Image: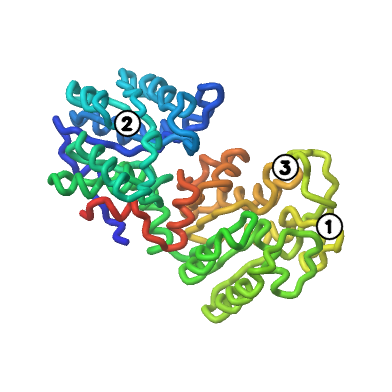
């Protein structure tokens, strides 16, 4: 996958209609936006196009839209907040058809620097290109509204959806450009290049619950990194594969052979594979998850009592992992070290976050729970880059080609 893509800086947009696929999949409560991070992240690209004299047409999905178009998953609240952020009106096309007559009329009436926001792309029911023909038709209708296309929705870039990748085919057919926005370019610069061209030593840290979720990531990163650190629930499958007693800890028995293979692979490649040496245990998983009066103890990772469950990395492991990060030049982290939502069980994740905050290395947080953890623990501003896409960043780390990236024109 070529990572040298055309960006908005390569486009001459004055007087042109530019369709921008954003990620406005924001959390809503009673119709109000509770976190505007994704809207703010889209502003640099939108403002660049406005200042260049483009007619800016924005589109995005919101929610999963399982029960057809509905006002609860409309992009109307996004249009309102976006208008406030841009300091100018955003013409919202509320039509559930997304690309119907109302959208065409709104685009035809645009002047240079105007902004139109189309309705939730998933309201068409064909956004995900099933059946393909219907998705193709929707993609063509989107392309008919524009001259050029910019993808700035990294969180959706691993999906070959109508508004993410299929639309580029029709833009290209009419002689238009397909570029990436600033947000996408930043993800490519950090995540893509960290994996393909890392400054060494390169340390990768993987956590989270299940080995199954990260099979290909572990395999790919072992070939790319110098040290691979494993924490979180997934560590117990690795520990059991080594013959350790893990008590009631989370384990994926079907992946024991895989873990043995990965341990052998690391040895063969001369890579360091670090596993917890001590573990914070409790009688059971906290219920509710943030229960603060949970009783815990720390034990060696190979001697977890039969009636206890491992829920965080211990103090020796925190030191071991922090030391491994100190000499790194590039660090990629995906997945917490324990049940970070609980104040008693957040220390492992906090220690790793602090180690990353204190290092001079380029530090990249691979979206999802890791991003939530560094935000929650107050270390976000100390990281070089926090990815906006959980699933997309994982697939990038797997070495997969992302449709939304591939579809953009090479420079």
Q: Earlier in the sequence, mark 2 or mark 1?
A: 2
How far across and down, in percent of the image, does residue 249 sit?
76, 59
Residue at image location 60% in from the left, 49% down from the top: 353
Which residue of the protein is positioned furthest toward the bottom in this rendering? Answer: 268
Q: Quadrant of the N terminus?
A: bottom left
Asked whether the residues under the numbered discs 3 and 2 touch, taking CB atoms below 8 Å apart as contact, a structural biologist would say: no
Place of residue 122 in the rendered image (x, y in percent of width and height, measured from the top left) = 40, 37
The answer to whether 14 is drawn above or below residue 394 in the figure is above
Question: Alpha carbon of mark 2 to alpha carbon of mark 1: how far?
Answer: 53 Å
36 and 253: which is toward the camera: 253
Task: For mark 3, give the secondary structure.
Answer: loop
Question: Measured along the vertical axis of the image, is residue 284 above or below residue 61?
Answer: below
Residue at mark 2? 98
Where the C terminus falls, by quadrant?
bottom left
Q: Which residue bears the numbered disc 1?
A: 308
Depth-wise, is mark 3 or mark 1 nearer the camera?
1
Mark closer to the chain start, 3 or 2: 2
Q: Which-is-in-front pick, marks 2 and 1? A: 2
Residue 244 versus residue 343 in the image, above or below? below
What is the crowding at mark 1: few (fewer than 14 residues within 10 Å), some, or many (at least 20)?
A: some
Give the distance between the C-alpha atoms of the residues marked 3 and 2, in whole angstroms: 42 Å
């Amino acid at each position: 996958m070529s990572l040298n893509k055309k960006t908005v800086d390569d486009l001459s947009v004055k007087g042109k209609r530019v369709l921008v696929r954003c990620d406005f999949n924001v959390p809503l409560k009673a119709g109000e936006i509770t976190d505007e991070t994704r809207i703010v992240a889209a502003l640099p690209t939108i403002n660049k196009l406005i200042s260049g004299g483009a007619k800016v047409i924005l589109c995005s999905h919101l929610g999963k839209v399982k029960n057809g178009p509905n006002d609860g998953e409309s992009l109307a609240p996004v249009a309102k907040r976006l208008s406030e952020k841009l300091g100018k009106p955003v013409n919202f096309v509320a039509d559930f058809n997304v690309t119907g007559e109302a959208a065409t009329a709104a685009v035809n009436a645009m002047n240079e620097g105007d902004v139109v926001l189309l309705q939730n792309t998933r309201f068409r029911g064909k956004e995900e290109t099933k059946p393909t023909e219907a998705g193709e038709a929707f993609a063509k209708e989107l392309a008919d509204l524009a001259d050029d296309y910019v993808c700035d929705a990294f969180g959706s870039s691993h999906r070959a959806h109508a508004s993410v990748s299929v639309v580029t085919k029709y833009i290209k057919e009419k002689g238009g450009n397909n570029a990436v926005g600033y947000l996408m370019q930043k993800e490519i610069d950090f995540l893509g290049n960290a994996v393909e061209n890392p400054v060494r030593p390169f340390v990768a840290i993987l956590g989270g619950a299940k080995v199954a979720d990260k099979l290909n990531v572990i395999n790919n990163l072992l070939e790319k990194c110098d040290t691979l650190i494993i924490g979180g629930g997934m560590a117990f499958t690795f520990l059991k594969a080594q013959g350790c007693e893990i008590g009631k800890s989370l384990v994926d028995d079907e992946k024991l052979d895989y873990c043995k293979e990965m341990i052998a692979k690391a040895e063969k490649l001369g890579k360091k594979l670090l596993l917890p040496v001590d573990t914070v245990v409790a009688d059971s998983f906290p219920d509710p998850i943030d229960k603060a009066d949970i009783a815990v103890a720390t034990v060696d990772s190979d001697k977890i009592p039969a009636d206890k469950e491992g829920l965080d990395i211990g103090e020796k492991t925190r030191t071991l992992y922090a030391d491994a990060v100190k000499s790194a030049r590039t660090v990629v982290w995906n997945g917490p070290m324990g049940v970070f939502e609980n104040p008693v069980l957040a220390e492992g994740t906090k220690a790793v976050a602090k180690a990353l905050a204190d290092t001079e290395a380029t530090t990249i947080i691979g979206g999802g729970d890791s991003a939530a953890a560094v935000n929650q623990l107050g270390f976000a501003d100390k990281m070089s880059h926090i990815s906006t896409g959980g699933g997309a960043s994982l697939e990038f780390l797997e070495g997969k080609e992302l449709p939304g990236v591939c579809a953009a024109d090479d420079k």
